[in-house]
Image: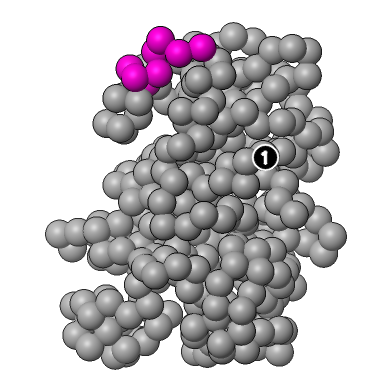
């Protein structure tokens, strides 16, 4: 978090307004439109009722030990079946790949040159877009597939990356053999921990950070408390991971409550962290009684861990409300 340290020093002398404005400009790159979340129940808020069991660049010890996950695997909370959940485009773009048996269909959307989102394990009969389709943020692409007999329960594998094909990953000369083969858009979904580069070094990006760094591009933002969040959370002076962060109070959260966001602090798009502890997403919110404070929105969860015991799962305490 070298940049975060420099930014904090720079912001040290600013009042609350300058603070928020300065943070809003952080991470503005590649696109000028906001990114949302990739999964929802019909009529529900995106992300509400779901958890990332295996986060970006974490290890999934029961499915593919010894490898970094290149995606976020979204599951329903509390072990409920994820099949049938709606899969949504996270931003506007063009469908540049539709196919595969991953198992289930794979869709890849190009949002900007060198910025793609990828959605895996989709029910084939549920796909509502075609290759070449233009899609809007929040548009339904498909639903999550049921895959009988597969080791993994139904889930959405969701990637953000800079490439459609990258020679050494999924192009002409993959460095590591995997079932997808040559010039295979879906790619391997994992990258060996023994490789000299992390997934971020090959072009995969932390989806939560990509979204977090772009949430305020529309100028205003509201966040909502999901059904799974109750009770008090720590209200901080600055984002929780900063050295001088301290608690300024507790905030009771009730499902459905909404807050205006004054600023967002998110980690780097190409984060080099390798556990859920390296997820950084905090909101500076108005609490409604004339005060404001920072709330940690992406929280490590030990529901799944890497072989070294560090958390692989991420749950969200507040969710963005995007039209
Ligand atoms: Zn996955």
Q: Is residue 315 visible?
A: no
33 vs 185: above or below: above
The N terminus lies in quadrant: top left
Q: Is residue 117 left or right of residue 316?
A: left
* Residue drawn at point x = 71 percent, y = 55 percent: 46
Q: Is residue 89 visible?
A: yes
Span colored in magenta: 8-15
Pick whichever, 176 or 90, lies toward us.
90
219 vs 62: above or below: above
The quarter of the picture where residue 162 lies is: bottom left
The quarter of the picture where residue 215 lies is: top right
* Residue drawn at point x = 56 percent, y = 19 percent: 17
Pick whichever, 321 or 301, lies toward us.
321
- Is-magenta flag for residue 259? no
**Residue where numbered disc 1 is placed:** 221
The C terminus lies in quadrant: bottom right
Q: Position of residue 128 (x, y in %)?
A: 71, 84
Q: Is residue 20 left or right of residue 243?
A: right
* Residue drawn at point x = 34 percent, y = 47 percent: 271
Judged from the image, the secondary structure of the residue bearing numbered disc 1 is loop
Q: Position of residue 41 (x, y in %)?
A: 78, 61
246 vs 322: above or below: above
* Residue drawn at point x = 67 percent, y = 44 percent: 320
């Amino acid at each position: 978090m070298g940049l975060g340290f420099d930014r904090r020093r720079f912001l040290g002398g600013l009042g609350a307004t300058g603070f928020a404005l300065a943070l809003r400009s952080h991470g503005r790159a590649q696109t000028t439109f906001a990114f949302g979340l990739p999964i929802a129940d019909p009529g529900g808020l995106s992300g509400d009722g779901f958890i990332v069991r295996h986060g970006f660049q974490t290890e999934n010890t029961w499915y593919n030990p010894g490898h970094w996950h290149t995606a976020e695997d979204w599951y329903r909370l509390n072990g409920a079946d994820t099949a049938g959940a709606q899969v949504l485009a996270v931003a506007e773009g063009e469908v540049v790949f539709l196919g595969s048996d991953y198992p289930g269909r794979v869709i890849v959307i190009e949002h900007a040159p060198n910025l793609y989102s990828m959605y895996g394990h989709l029910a084939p009969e549920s796909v509502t877009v075609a290759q070449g389709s233009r899609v809007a943020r929040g548009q339904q692409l498909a639903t999550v597939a049921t895959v009988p007999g597969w080791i993994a329960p139904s889930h959405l594998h969701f990637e953000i990356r800079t490439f459609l094909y990258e020679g050494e990953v999924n192009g002409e000369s993959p460095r590591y053999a995997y079932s997808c083969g040559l010039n295979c858009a879906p790619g391997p979904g994992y990258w060996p921990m023994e490789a000299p580069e992390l997934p971020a070094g090959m072009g995969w990006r932390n989806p939560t950070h990509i979204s977090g760094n772009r949430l305020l591009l529309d100028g205003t933002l509201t966040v909502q408390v999901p059904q799974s969040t109750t009770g008090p959370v720590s209200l901080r002076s600055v984002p929780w991971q900063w050295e001088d962060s301290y608690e300024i109070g507790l905030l009771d959260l009730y499902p459905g409550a909404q807050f205006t966001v004054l600023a967002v602090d998110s980690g780097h798009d190409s984060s080099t962290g390798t556990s859920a502890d390296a997820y950084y997403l905090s909101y500076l919110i108005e609490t409604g009684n004339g005060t404001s404070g920072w709330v940690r929105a992406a929280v490590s969860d030990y529901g799944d861990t890497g072989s070294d015991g560090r958390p692989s799962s991420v749950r969200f305490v507040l969710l963005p409300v995007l039209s």
